[in-house]
Amino acid sequence: MEKIILEKLSGETRTAKVGKILIKVGQNIKEGDGLFNAESAKGNFIVKSQYNGTILNVMIEEGQQIKIGESIAEIDGQKADRKFNNGNSTYSFGLAKPKKKDISCDIAIIGGGPGGYVAAIRAAQLGASVVLIEKDKIGGTCLNHGCIPTKSFVKSAHLYDEMQKSELFGINAGQMTLDIKQIVKRKNEVVSNLSDGIKYLLEHWNIQLIEGEAKVSKDIIHIKNNRLDASIQAKNIIIATGSSPARLNIPGASLPVVMTSEDILNLSKIPKSITIIGGGVIGMEFAFILNSFGSKVTVVEYTDNILSNFDEDIIEVVTDECIQRGISLYTKAKVEAISLSEDKEAITTFSQNGETHFLVGETVLMSVGRNANLNSIDLDALGVELNERKNGIKVDEHMATSNTSVYAIGDVTNRIPLAHVASHQGIIAVENCMGKDSSMDYSAIPSAVFVSPELGVVGLCEKEAKQLGIPYQISKFPFSANGKALSQGDTKGFVKILFDDKDYKILGAAVIGPGATDLISNFTNLIQQKIDYRTLSHTVFAHPTTAEAVNEAILGITGEMIHFA
């Protein structure tokens, strides 16, 4: 007789409520059969048996809370991976030989980031059999090393900033201190919770998740890990292998004092000073985070301005905030080398206007973009071509590659390296795999940047319109004229709309100010659907909200702003 012990729940869940019990005394069960329905914060799922045999006693009741390590039932049988000899059990606790398995499926997806796992779920919704392959952690860079953990840091930074100003709101908070270990711990908990949720969704949709590195030969994908040696034959393959942080090819780029955007998310202490190489989105987000945490921050940017892809009025607001906060900016500056001082601090050498400069900081963050993971699988074996610049996989509007049964999505295509773009590309790719005719539309892709004040843009910006020779007009409403922004003491920034007064269409929009990353979505559908802006004048927005600034900017298109003249 053996006891069936609860060894695992969905993802990293530790406790669950017992729902319907699926076994009874005398029932013969085998590995993979359901034992009971479980309910947790992650949703409902079935706990499955790892044993073969006959149930002797059921030790759980419906409605009870059960946790990992507790007994479910007693069974006359054995665990599926145990070996028995002449009735005497000999247990193998060493590393078992990987089980060879041939798998056939409709769609195999290589990479479990925001492109890959969303594609897998959409494929399952459409009735496909799906295998999802991930060599590291489910959720990819976005969940584990990028968007989500960074925003957890942003929340800590913003909260600390707000508490520093609490006396203005009549609150005396006393002396405050930062605990970087707790900040990192909370970040890890957020990541873990979201990872659990994805694993639950994969289980819910019966998606087979295989952990390991994919090797391809012609139309076969090979995966080998400690438990499985699999050969996968798929009707269609989706490549979603993502990207990795880039490093400048300069002396000292690999010194221990040089971090990437992934390394910095696991800080054990707050650096007293830091030099950030790169004033793009990632570099500037960390500039504000670390400034809030108390670091002396210096940013060195190669182009004419920080956030150089954005319009000048947006750059001006962010630059002014940097000056007020004491963030030092060096633009039109080329980093030449990184070296160590006698006391092991980082010396960053850069040239600007023909002169050589030196910056000393406790550490360096290299934030100079990302490179597509093109070497993670053998593209030649799949017959997949690169784009003209050889920096991404070549795809068409259906996300198909030069091999019509292979698709590519996300950063590995080097189109627009944003998580939500990868997710939608995954949906487009899957729908085409399943016989639909879906195309990727890049005309209204919103972008969110979590600097201070935060900003969001969608559609055309002024720089693009000028480059393309597209005529436009502007309507702009400042947050200093918005009631909620004033009551929050957060009045920097504006809502700006680019519009065509001939066709009555909104061409693009930018929001910089309180809640900008959420407010920008108000414009996405208006631009994508080419809505006639004259039909929007009677749309009612709640008061008092920052969204009223969106309404005022729309009214301003026809010269009808109410609260600004």
Image (cartoon, rainbow, N blue to C red):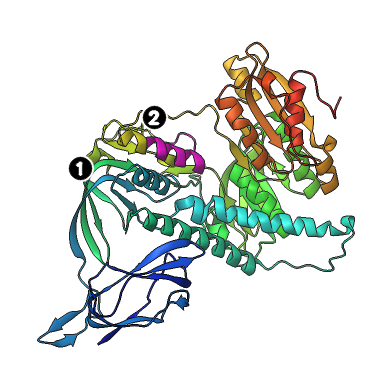
Residue 244 seen from this side: yes
SS under mark 1: loop
Residue 377 seen from this side: no
Q: Which residue corresponds to mark 2?
A: 438
Q: Which mark is residue 88?
A: none
**Segment tinted magenta in the rendering:** 413-429
In x, y percent, where is residue 524? 59, 31
Circle 2 Cα neighbour tier, 10 Å, few/some/many (<14 / 14–19 / ≥20):
some
Q: Nearer the viewer, residue 18 or 246?
A: 18
Query: Which numbered disc, 2 or 1, marks the residue closer to the eye?
Result: 2
Task: Specify the principal SS of the magenta part.
Answer: helix
In the rendered image of this protein, does residue 194 appear above or below residue 407?
below
Q: Nearer the viewer, residue 526 or 404?
A: 526
Indicate yes or no whether the magenta region holds residue 46: no
At x 55%, y 65%, the residue is 189
In x, y percent, where is residue 248? 51, 45
The image quadrant that residue 106 belongs to is top left
**For the residue marked with disc 2, what is the amino acid?**
Ser
At x 69%, y 24%, the residue is 536
**For the residue marked with disc 1, what is the amino acid?**
Asp
In the rendered image of this protein, does residue 97 appear above or below residue 365?
below
The image quadrant that residue 497 belongs to is top right
Residue reaching furthest to the left: 86
In x, y percent, where is residue 205? 37, 53
Is 525 placed left or right of 519 in the picture?
A: left
Q: Which residue corresponds to mark 1?
A: 219
The image quadrant that residue 190 belongs to is bottom right
Q: Quadrant of the C terminus?
A: top right
Circle 1 Cα neighbour tier, 10 Å, few/some/many (<14 / 14–19 / ≥20):
some
Query: If you read the primary sequence from the N terminus, does the residue marked by circle 2 or circle 1 appear first?
Result: 1
SS under mark 2: loop
